Amino acid sequence: MYELQPKKFLLLNILMILHCYSDENHRLSQKNIIDILQNEYEMKVDRKSVMRNLIDLGVYLEGTGYELDYDVSVRKVPVKKEGTDEYLIDSVTGERVYEEQEKMSDFYLKRPFEDSEVRLLIDAIMFSMNISDKHRKDLVYKLCKLSSNRFKSRVKHMVCVGATINKNQEIFANIEAIDEAISLNRKISFNYMEYGIDKKMYPKKDENGVVREYVINPYQMAAKDGKYYLICNYDKYEDISNYRIDRIKNIKILEDKIKPFEELRDTNGRRLELGTYMKEHIYMYSSDNEKVSFKIVKAMISDVIDIFGSDVSFRDETDTHVIAVVKVNLKSMIQFAKNYAPDVEVLTPEWVREEIKEELKKAMAVYL
């Protein structure tokens, strides 16, 4: 069995001390490190040993994403005669000869992620609708380890708003399997789940009551509104579909090669451009994309840009309204218009306008 040498133990312990207790605003002196080594690791060492290991640690960390940072000050120290304890004297002035030496102090471990970046990642996890409470806590715990112990105390007050009831523990395995399938250009099969009134998930069935097996061509995964989607093609059809990854069960990677995205209907032979696709599919519905014009109240301009991106154009501005034009998934547009009625009025295409009108009539009839 390999035994770690005491010198290596010292270096690793110093690394752990810097990782747990130091950051840019909380630096450690050599004395701080010596005290922690003695109190927590029962190691009694001198300053020279600590300094040698700090220098070695700085070299070992190169290229790892971590970096040992410190302050450097210059001081003048008297020079001793070589091989003696006597000080060297200047023959002209009769004074001691001094030389400048650099002194390293106030050490801390510079990490690949700043605390604000770790906090941003934690926020994304806390508000994800795909992850169970247990996985959410596990991931937050792991992310906290990227920073010092002080950071952990600052996230204790964080709570999850709008927690999901989704209990699909396969989501991470699903992501790995889909990623592998995409890399291998292979089809996948799975069962797709939906909720019952008992808040439990059940596989979707066909008209004969048999659990349906979906065979699809996977192209890309994307996050939208706190949910993960698989952008793909259901093998029986020639259009694009989107499936919630957290609702996928029993996934299998098949031997068959995928149908190329550019061969699908309405792709015009072009490859999938994820940024454009996400802008056009604001609700991740599957249907045709088309240029739509709609009138909005001017107070909604910022909201429209947030939702549709910078590709939206505006014209015919008045004191109260403006017309917006954007290429968008038509089912998504219909839902958007219903959500924001009466502040949004679709103008063209005419058939979309008429469909919205009919759906609003049906909605109105429910309340009469």
Image (tube, rainbow, N blue to C red):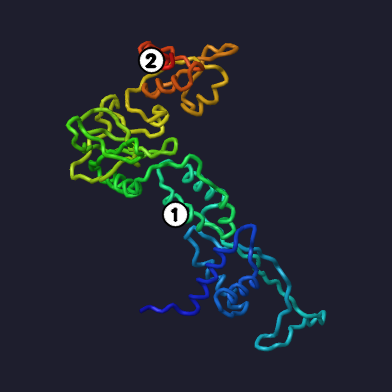
Q: Residue at x 35, y 42 (%)?
A: 246
Q: Secondary structure at mark 1?
A: helix
Using the image, determine if residue 111 lies above or below residue 324: below
**Mark 1 residue type:** Asp
- Work out how far the residue at label 1 is from the one at label 2, CA to CA, in angstroms: 46 Å
Q: Hey, what amino acid is under mark 2?
A: Lys
Question: Residue 83's spot in the image, x, y percent?
Answer: 65, 88
Q: Residues within 10 Å of mark 1 (few under 14, many from 20)?
A: few
Of mark 1 and mark 2, the one earlier in the sequence is: 1
Secondary structure of residue under mark 2:
helix
Quick check: 27 left or right of 63? right
Viewer-proximal residue among 343 and 273: 343
Give residue 118's mark.
none
What x and y, as percent, mark residue 324? 48, 17
Horizontally, residue 108 falls left or right of residue 212, namely right
Front residue of 16/106: it is: 16
Q: What residue is disc 1 on?
A: 138
Disc number for residue 362: 2
Residue under the image location 59 percent in, 80 percent down = 44
**Residue 72 at x, y = what percent?**
66, 65
